[in-house]
Image (cartoon, rainbow, N blue to C red):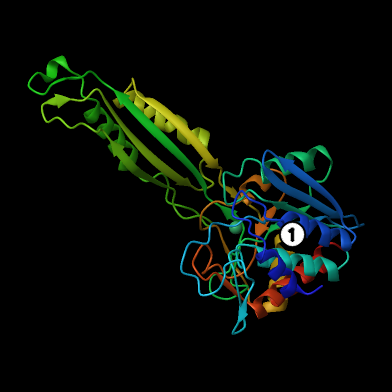
């Protein structure tokens, strides 16, 4: 099984989220050819699959996604052409993350062991009919692995320099304060919602949520919009609203932060409405035999000891962390979501070697 040729085939499928473009079928056929039992799991419009090769030892699952973000304009090569030039493979998804999928498939072809793949077509989009649903199916069918590796492009400058062992949580909130409209000359007859909103936002941003810990940077609340939309200069408006985002570490959870926001609103704007949308909770995978096996594999193949990191945005690992230990390791992510996304062909082979070494070590 040639990792480059398979990566090129995946890149030639136009799978701009939520479209599948034939990627899942291509992958399913390849896994069946390697002796895996493939279960296609379609939820809503989203194609997903679970492929498993049973074995005696520990169960290692590789998680990833076949969907990609739109290519945009201005590429030097066809973003769905799978073109190789100057030792680089170009294409939307080259590093995020069809390249990693090809590397893992090649690794599984070479190394025996209890290995499975959880591949979704819904990571770059809303992520509701993808990993979350497949995990529910896996739990219902006794398929939860002992360790899961997500192939997101975690490496910073060279393959092997960073592995992610956790991620911050993220939540969005919208606050709407309703007051009583009135003439600015008669403020005692009105109730200015802008003043209430400002007081509440000041209280929310006055103090740091925490100062971080060994594994996480400090949590951060950022007000992203304040909206009043009042065109008149002599009218106290009836409503004012604001939106904010909180990126929080493992010292918080969304329920606690929601209660904290409600407490501040109760003090400064009791009639305010609060709507919260949680993108994901924070998680941290404690060091253990699983993360050590991954580190050993990276060290053996790349000669580097990876930094264990929890930075960046959210990923599907946040869902997997509810079920089993999870870490993320993949290609250098610099070109992800950019024009001319590309991966070094040599790095694809090295990543396949890392995954192969991990299977040989972990699945014994
Ligand atoms: Zn990705």
Q: Quadrant of residue 262?
A: top left
Q: Is residue 185 above or below residue 37?
A: above
In the image, residue 191 lies at what x, y percent? 21, 20
Quadrant in the picture for the C terminus: bottom right
Neighbours of disc 1 within 10 Å: few (<14), some (14-19), many (20+): many
Which residue lies at the image location 25% right of the left edge and 28% below the top edge?
A: 196
Which residue lies at the image location 75% right of the left edge and 60% below the top edge?
A: 289
Residue furthest to the bottom? 86
Foreground: 115 or 285? 115
* Left or right: where 49 falls relative to 13: right
Q: Is residue 111 above or below residue 250?
A: below
Q: Which residue is mark 1?
A: 290
Please say whether residue 170 is visible from this viewpoint: yes
Residue furthest to the left? 185
SS at mark 1 in the image: helix
Q: Is residue 349 above or below residue 79?
A: below
Which residue lies at the image location 23% right of the left edge and 30% below the top edge?
A: 194
Q: Is residue 179 above or below residue 91?
A: above
* Left or right: where 324 falls relative to 247: right
Quadrant in the picture for the N terminus: bottom right
């Amino acid at each position: 099984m040639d990792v480059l040729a398979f990566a090129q085939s995946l890149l030639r499928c136009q799978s701009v989220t939520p479209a599948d473009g034939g990627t899942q079928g291509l992958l399913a056929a390849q896994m069946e050819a390697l002796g895996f039992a493939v279960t296609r799991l379609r939820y809503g419009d989203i194609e997903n699959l679970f492929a498993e090769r049973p074995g005696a030892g520990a169960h290692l699952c590789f998680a990833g996604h076949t969907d990609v973000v739109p290519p945009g304009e201005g590429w030097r090569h066809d973003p769905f052409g799978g073109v190789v030039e100057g030792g680089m493979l170009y294409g939307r998804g080259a590093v995020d993350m069809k390249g990693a999928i090809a590397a893992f498939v090649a690794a599984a072809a070479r190394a025996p062991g209890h290995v499975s793949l959880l591949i979704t077509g819904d990571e770059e989009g809303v992520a509701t009919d993808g990993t979350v649903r497949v995990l529910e199916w896996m739990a219902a069918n006794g398929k939860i692995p002992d360790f899961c590796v997500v192939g997101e492009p975690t490496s910073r400058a060279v393959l092997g320099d960073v592995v992610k062992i956790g991620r911050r949580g993220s939540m969005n909130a919208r606050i709407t304060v309703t007051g009583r409209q009135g003439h600015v000359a008669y403020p005692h007859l009105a109730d200015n919602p802008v003043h209430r909103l400002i007081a509440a936002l000041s209280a929310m941003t006055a103090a740091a949520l925490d100062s971080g810990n060994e594994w996480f940077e400090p949590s951060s609340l950022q007000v992203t919009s304040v909206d009043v939309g009042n065109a008149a200069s002599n009218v106290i408006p009836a409503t004012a609203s604001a939106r904010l985002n909180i990126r929080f570490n493992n010292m918080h959870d969304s329920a606690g932060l929601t209660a904290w926001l409600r407490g501040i609103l109760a003090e400064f704007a009791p009639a305010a409405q609060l709507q919260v949308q949680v993108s994901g909770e924070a998680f941290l995978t404690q060091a253990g035999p699983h993360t050590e096996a991954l580190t050993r594999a990276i060290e053996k193949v790349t000669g580097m000891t990876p930094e264990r990191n929890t930075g960046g945005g959210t990923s599907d690992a946040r869902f997997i962390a509810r079920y089993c230990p999870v870490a993320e390791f993949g290609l250098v992510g610099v070109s992800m979501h950019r024009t001319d996304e590309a991966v070094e062909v040599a790095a694809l082979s090295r990543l396949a070697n890392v995954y192969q070494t991990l299977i040989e070590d972990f699945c014994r």
